Image (cartoon, rainbow, N blue to C red):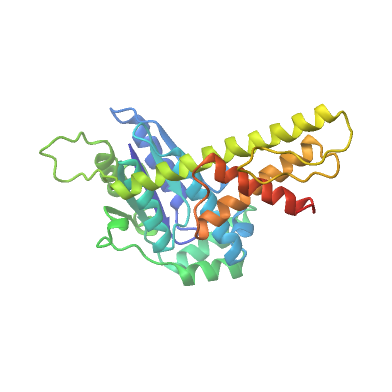
Amino acid sequence: MALVVICGQPCSGKSTAALFLAEVLKESESKQTVRIIDETSLHLDRNQSYANMTAEKNLRGVLRSEVDRSVSKDNIIIVDSLNSIKGYRYELWCLARAAGIRYCVLYCDIEETNCRKWNEERRDKGEAAYDDVIFEDLVRRFEKPERRNRWDSPLFELWPHKDGIDKSCAAILDAVSYLTKKVDSKTQDVKILQPTIATQSVRFSEANSLYELDRATQEVINAIVEAQSQALGGPLNGVSLGQEFPTFNISRSVGLPELRRLRRTFIKLTGQTSLSGRPPPSDADSAKRMFVDYLNRELGTA
């Protein structure tokens, strides 16, 4: 149905805006299914998640993956986080486009001094707050959304310190109207993103590759376990999966827990490689060859 990106400085009222937006959407005539995705729902600590660039990159990856799994034409997903990097907002926009749904940005526009004051008040009350060093770093690196950018449009702006935040705020009501308005051939003011052929092909290719990788590695594990059970604990000269595949040169008994651990690590490493360049194997045979080579290296029998 739609993806809503909440954007703003730390301690600018984003979570309050997300809650009110969700409430109004649920109370609307269309009775939308709404879900808020944020650090808290994923059990992530804000200071640990922004402690350094690596941690922050991991946080964005976790949030993006959860959004990717959740967006559909049957619900509205609200991403309640800083979403302060324009390149990251572009990535979220791409997820909405790939899903063929509506997209908008709700921006909490507030002066840094007020954000700083609210953060200090939270700390004094014993509530979750940012460490001063982390807060100043996030404020410094914040990239304000601009409605001329397609990934920041349409842009609905809130001014929490000046107008407060409640269900009657103009920006929230305008966003709800945009998200729930019925669309026909004459509708001009609502844009439903359309997936490109390239986007659809990539998503299908990645899903197909992961399926083949999962299936092929499990078949290798099953073959090894079966060969060891037939040997009744005796020595094995190797496990052959066929003439077209390398032999698994096993010199000792390898338990199922160890094989499963190695399989999980292999799948994880292969996925990381695909993010940085070469895609994962798209057919079962290639996956089997890679997995057997990996097992031989890890078990020191290559």
What x and y, as percent, mark residue 262? 72, 45
Q: Is residue 128 left or right of residue 1?
A: right
Q: Is residue 206 above or below residue 91?
A: above
Horizontal side of 19 relative to 195 (left or right) equals: right
Q: Quadrant of residue 260?
A: top right
- The residue furthest front is 243
Which residue is the extreme one toward the right? Answer: 234
* Residue 16 image position (x, y, % from top left): 45, 47
Name which residue lies at 34% across and 48% down.
199
Quadrant of the drawing holding the N terminus: top left
Instruction: Give coordinates of residue 208: x percent, y percent.
Output: 47, 40
Residue 211 relative to residue 237: left or right: left
Q: Residue at x 52, y 60 (%)?
A: 276
Taking 278 as reference, is 220 above or below it? above
- Residue nearest the viewer, comparing 118 with 143: 143
On the image, the x and y values in percent for residue 273 come to 56, 56
Q: What residue is rendered at 73% in x and 54% in y?
A: 297
Q: Nearer the viewer, residue 228 or 148?
A: 228
